[in-house]
Amino acid sequence: MNRTGILLSSLAAGLFFFSSCSMEKYCPDPDVDLPAHILRDAAETDSLALADMEWWEIYTDTILQNLIRKTLANNKDMQAAISKIRQLRYGSRASLAENFPSADLWLGKRNEILNYYGEGLNPHPEPGLKAAVSWEINLLGAGIWQTRGAKDRYLSSIEGQRALQMSLIAEVATAYFELLSLDQQLDIVRRTMEIRRESREKEKLRFSGGLTSEIPYRQAIVEYASAATMVPEIERQIALKEHEIALLAGEFPSRITRSNTRLKSQFLIDIPVGLPSELLLRRPDIRQSRSDLDEAMANAGFRFASRFPSFQISANAGFEANTHSWAHIFQSPYAYPYVYFLAPLLHFGRNQNRYKAALEEYMQQKSKYEQVVLTAFKEVNDAMVVYQKVTQTSALLLNLQEAARKYAELAELQYLNGVIGYIDVLDAQRQFFDAQLDLVRSICDEYIALVDLYKALGGGWNEELPPGALTKIQERKQEKAVRKQMNDSTIQNRPGLSKEETLRTLYREYLGEQVTERNEQLIRQDFSDGSEEKGAAVSEKKKKRAGKDRRKQAGGKAD
């Protein structure tokens, strides 16, 4: 059986290679003809992109950083994604094990009741100790295709978790900036209420003293009440925004601590977006879609191979006696090997239709992958246009606010000198009030536009694997690497992390680099018109930037 197994394995490997060539023929590569630039009107490409920065370098507010870390640790969707990684990792291992021989052991006793014609009832006891070994080999590697599909699902789950992390970071940052903006709006409204309260009291004294009619006094009351009605609405929005952040962080509704720093306009800055090939390699949703495409190809390969015969090599051996007693069971050995040749003759039509359905499923996934790539470029262009326009709007609104402030001051002086009426003063104050609120909202839009651009470029995640997704062996190697490097004074702590936490993060990033290497190779194969060289240059630069330091600091090899 040994020689037969080796021979069949060699035959299956050769036929699997033939099957792979066939699948590449019937499963065409995706059409990813990359444009010369990521942005529509870009004059030149830049190899250094905004998304190359880590999220804690973009969001420097330490309170926001703590909120993001809490969200990544406690968010329920994130925990479910980590659990899915573990589930598919176990499934991938189980699928791999199905390609190897299986062994079973049976210990027991059974009674066969025989009643042949003319012989009468004859109980036939059989105590026994039996072992069975079997190994099924498909000629075109159906089991290998199935294993590849399980591995692709596992890789897709990792990229899905990273895409979720990218989205969660963007959602937390967006909600946090909106919360700061609402705080500023509430502060402006309350300061305006105080100014209008003073104006109301002044107009009341003027009216009581007979200096003015009742109309200015009533107008002052209306303006104060108008500002006061805005306070409950803004407070409502603040409470709901706090509840939203608490939900993202996996907590019950509570008050969210935030910075007292006021949002300030960043004005229009030149943001490099990088090369088109970098966008494909960087965005986890594109990498996830590429893994799904490869899984669809593996499923088509499995259906292709399932149409053809397979061998099953089996061997049964053990001890079996035909008496009630176990005393002489080891004196009754038996063994018989056998080889099955299974040909799905009557099932070929059904398997053929399943294979064709799998090919169509691949074509659907191919179109989805191409659509994801197109959508990525659209999102980057949209985000860049929005960022450019809102920063221009902020600059204009800043000038408008300054002009409205001076207008309100002059109107107050002219009113006191009797040149204009009180209605003109109220109009000037109202314009200044609206200009302040519009500027704060525009600056908030500017921050959110930068968040959206950073996310669209694929920023907001790193190659760190979540702790819950590590195997026991990886955890032991991590602990070993951490203990080994604890006394190294050259290691710089990450913002908000201790030295030990930094080392754990570095180790998980090292593991993440290995996980994504295969996906990046597949995506590079999709490049056309010389983009392969660009992708290789991107990968080389990435490895030089991160690989050496992380491997040196983390130490050891990943499992």
Image (cartoon, rainbow, N blue to C red):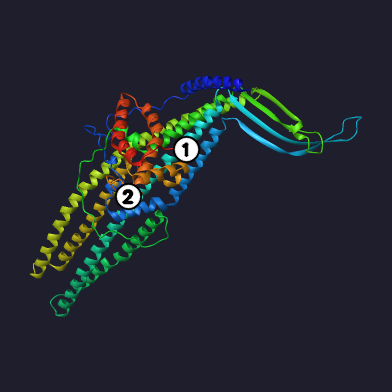
Count of numbered labels shown in the rendering: 2
Q: CA distance from mark 1 to mark 2?
A: 31 Å
Quarter of the rendering containing residue 462: top left
Q: Is residue 506 left or right of residue 434?
A: right
Name the kind of residue labelled 2 in the image. Answer: Lys
Q: Residue furthest right?
A: 118
Name the kind of residue labelled 1 in the image. Answer: Tyr
Q: Dots 1 and 2: beta carbons under 8 Å?
A: no
In-front residue for pair 102/184:
102
Q: Position of residue 477 (x, y in %)?
A: 42, 42
Camera-nearest label, 1 or 2: 2
Relative to 496, is 127 above or below? Answer: above
On-image quarter of the N terminus = top right
Relative to 305, is 430 above or below? Answer: below
Q: Position of residue 537 (x, y in %)?
A: 29, 29
On-image quarter of the C terminus = top left
Density class for disc 1 (Cα within 10 Å; few <14, some 14-19, many ≥20) is many
Q: Position of residue 429 (x, y in %)?
A: 18, 63
Q: Residue furthest bottom?
A: 209
Q: Position of residue 453 (x, y in %)?
A: 29, 43
Q: Residue at x 18, y 50 (%)?
A: 396
User: Which residue does the numbered mark 2 point to in the structure image?
Assistant: 499
Q: Residue at x 64, y 29 (%)?
A: 134
Is residue 424 visible to the viewer in this orientation of the structure? yes
Helix, strand or loop at label 1? It is helix
Density class for disc 2 (Cα within 10 Å; few <14, some 14-19, many ≥20) is some
Q: Disc number at residue 154?
A: 1
Lower sequence index among marks 1 and 2: 1
Q: Is residue 190 left or right of residue 108?
A: left
